[in-house]
Amino acid sequence: NHSQVLSLNIKANPSTLGTMSGNRIQLKTGNELIFIAQDEIIAVMAENIYCVFLLKDNKKVKTALSLSATMQLLDTKYFYKIHRSYIININTIERIDLATATVQLQYSTLVFPIARQQKKAFLAYLKTN
């Protein structure tokens, strides 16, 4: 069926899945458009072909965006890709364990790993921001 193929192609195109307007981003999840203020996002996790946005109110929003496409939507002054699977909001950092190279964020019980290749650059980034 041609309409199914067209639908899949549209779904795979990042420009139709998310856009940014001021401090808010627009995400397509299924048949809905969701508008999220960037300061409500604590982290974004890659999960197979999806990205899961973790919000301050413990809600999760799943979208078919790649992590790279997601990073293009977010303000790089506040968001940093610490691992190939994780982007964090640096304003929500509660603690960084240098021995285990992990980050604990406010509003979450999850612990996020910092990739070995990212650790030095991430710590330098934090010093300048």
Image (cartoon, rainbow, N blue to C red):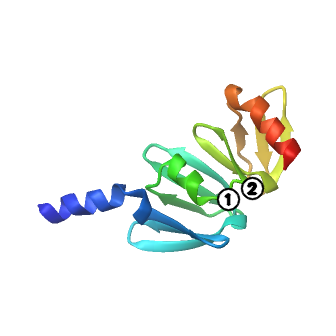
| Label 1 sits on residue | 75
Which residue is situated farthest in the left direction here?
A: 1
Task: Examine the image and state in which quarter residue 100 appears.
Answer: top right
| For residue 11, side relative to residue 17 (left or right) | left
Quadrant position of residue 126: top right
Q: Nearer the viewer, residue 128 or 81?
A: 128
The kind of secondary structure element at disc 1 is loop
Q: Are marks 2 and 1 in contact (CB under 8 Å)?
A: yes
Q: Position of residue 14 (x, y in %)?
A: 43, 57
Q: Amino acid at mark 1?
A: Asp
4 displayed left or right of 55: left
Rendered location of residue 20, percent (x, y): 57, 68
Q: Which mark is residue 20?
A: none
Q: Furthest residue to the front?
A: 128
Please give the name of the residue rendered at 67% of the width and 59% of the height, measured from the top-left corner: 75
Question: Residue 18: x, y in percent?
Answer: 49, 64
Disc 1 packing (10 Å; few <14; some 14–19; many ≥20):
some
Q: Nearer the viewer, residue 94 or 15?
A: 15
**Residue wearing tag 2:** 78
Residue 25 appears left or right of 56 = left
